[in-house]
Image (tube, helix red, strand yellow):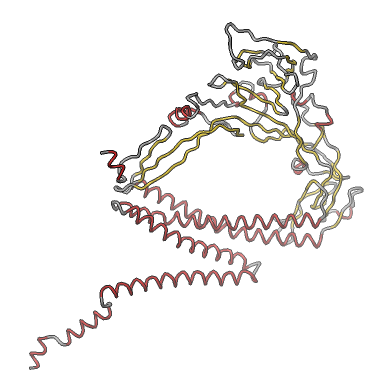
Amino acid sequence: MEDVGRMFGFGDPELAENQEIEHTSYGEKLSNACCGMFIGFLLFFGSLGVAGWNEYRNVANMKSINEAKEIFKEASCSPIKTELEGQLVHVTCPLSNFQVLGQNDPVLQGIPEAERTGLSLDSYMEVFQWKEVVKSKTTDDKVGGGSTTVKTHTYNRTWGFSAPSVVSNFHKGGASCQTQNNNNVCLNWDPQRESWWSLSGYGLGNKNIQTATNVKAGDYIVPDSKTGRLGDSKVLTPACSSSNAGGTTTTTTTTAPATTTTPATTAAPATTAAPSTTNSTGTRRELQSSTTTTAPVSTTSGTSLVCSPGGASLQGSKMVWQKQDSNGQTTDYLTRSYTIRTADTVSIFALQRGNTFIMWGSSYDNDYGLFEVTDGNFTAVQLLDQKEAENVGLTWTLRFLTLLLCIVGLVMITAPLTEIPDIIPCVGPLLGDLIGYALWVVDCLLGCCCWSVVVAIAWIAYRPQVAIPLLIASCGLCSLGGYAAYANHQKKQAGKTTEGGKGEDEEEGDIEVAAEYAPGDELEKE
């Protein structure tokens, strides 16, 4: 019976091991749609507000750029022209007064200072982890007005810069992931739970470690807030100094003790007294800390380098931490790389204030102005053209985004209307879908009308030559939509008249004639 019910769309579908099913009642669907309606109002009015602000922001930036083109002055790198104090200036100067960075990081102290001299030092850390991807498919029930959702859980292992999820929170406590992992337990290791993590100062993802201060552009001082954004990145290869390694460097051959024959991937305890490993090419070195760690068995030569927390190894230019996986294999689970930024010249377009720079505010709106600090040799025209292109790009991005959110808001507002027919057995979901398609068309037209009217009104104050035609077009679009709705109504009325044979006016006329020539009246006359 259950199979017959599935054949005709009744009953629950068969599920795979990585699937689960959820039922939503008719009342819950209406309740969710009503809650979504309030969110839709927020999206609708919020997007219109952002759309109006975006147009003002666009015009304010355009007027600021045009004003800057007329009033800016060319400054000199050395000596500083005091007569340009408080004016908008452009200057391109060589950079100097860099700093040696990474002096507090043990794994960088072995790198020559010339390679660690620059503008800013950053690190990037990734964690190898299992991630759960949930795909949902919802179908309306044939009876009852509810819906059935089938969720499919799939898993993939990849590098990410966020803290890994707890596997026990996966579907079936991680059992579904285990099925897709050749029946091996899925393991996620969170480095933030390691004993050495809190004292290391490390952070997942991109993290600025140090930024140079008082960097000079000619005789000017580059604002510290802009220094970290300058220059191109160069990857550093970590290296411990001889002092960090105890003042000596030794090469030995070590063999991990074992009572039975084990594969090379078996984990064996290692402490800081045990030297790390390096292969014959020198491309891999163990960087051990003062804490007891677990490392794979190795019988290769090694160089003792004691400077890395957590017992990381060096693979190319990356620090790598390892764990033993559930299949008995040792795997890399955490990496860290270092980059340093350097630059030769810098181009600045800002207000001169003493021997440094601050933001210049336009006369149109002091909150909008220019404060451009870009590495490289750029003329004032090039910087302003680039700023103008960025403004245009952001403006059109926000235009499309606000229009889309406006329409989505209207769809969410009208969503309850599509759920009401679902209570009708069998044909209810189909009717709801048809109503939904019709409402999509109406919502799109209405959303475009409302959005364009708001944009036109926002432009009236400062772009009347564009705003007035746009407002006329918007009103025409609204009128066209209203006329289309009226014509559709008239068409339906005409269809009813054709089906009934006579319209309402004709029926009223027949009634009057019948009353006028009633049989009783004729007898009285006779």
Q: Position of residue 313 (x, y in %)?
A: 69, 22
Relative depth, front residue between 407 and 454 = 407
Q: Position of residue 416 (x, y in %)?
A: 39, 54
Which quadrant does the N terminus fall into?
top left
Q: Quadrant of residue 194?
A: top right
Relative depth, front residue between 334 and 85 = 334
Q: Measuring 77% from the left and 38% from the top, which residue is drawn there?
A: 341
Marks counted in the figure total 0
Relative depth, front residue between 351 and 518 = 518
Which quadrant does the C terminus fall into?
bottom left
Q: Position of residue 354 (x, y in %)?
A: 85, 48
Relative depth, front residue between 340 and 459 = 340
State the residue lying farthest toward the bottom.
526
Asked whether the viewer can see residue 190, the reply is yes
Q: Position of residue 33 (x, y in %)?
A: 40, 50
Q: Quadrant of residue 418?
A: bottom left
Q: Quadrant of residue 510?
A: bottom left
State the residue lying farthest toward the right.
79
Reply above or below: 335 against 217.
Answer: above
State the residue lying farthest toward the top.
259
Asked whether the viewer can see residue 86, the reply is no
Reply above or below: 115 against 476.
Answer: above
Horizontally, residue 136 falls left or right of residue 502, namely right
Reply above or below: 53 against 158.
Answer: below
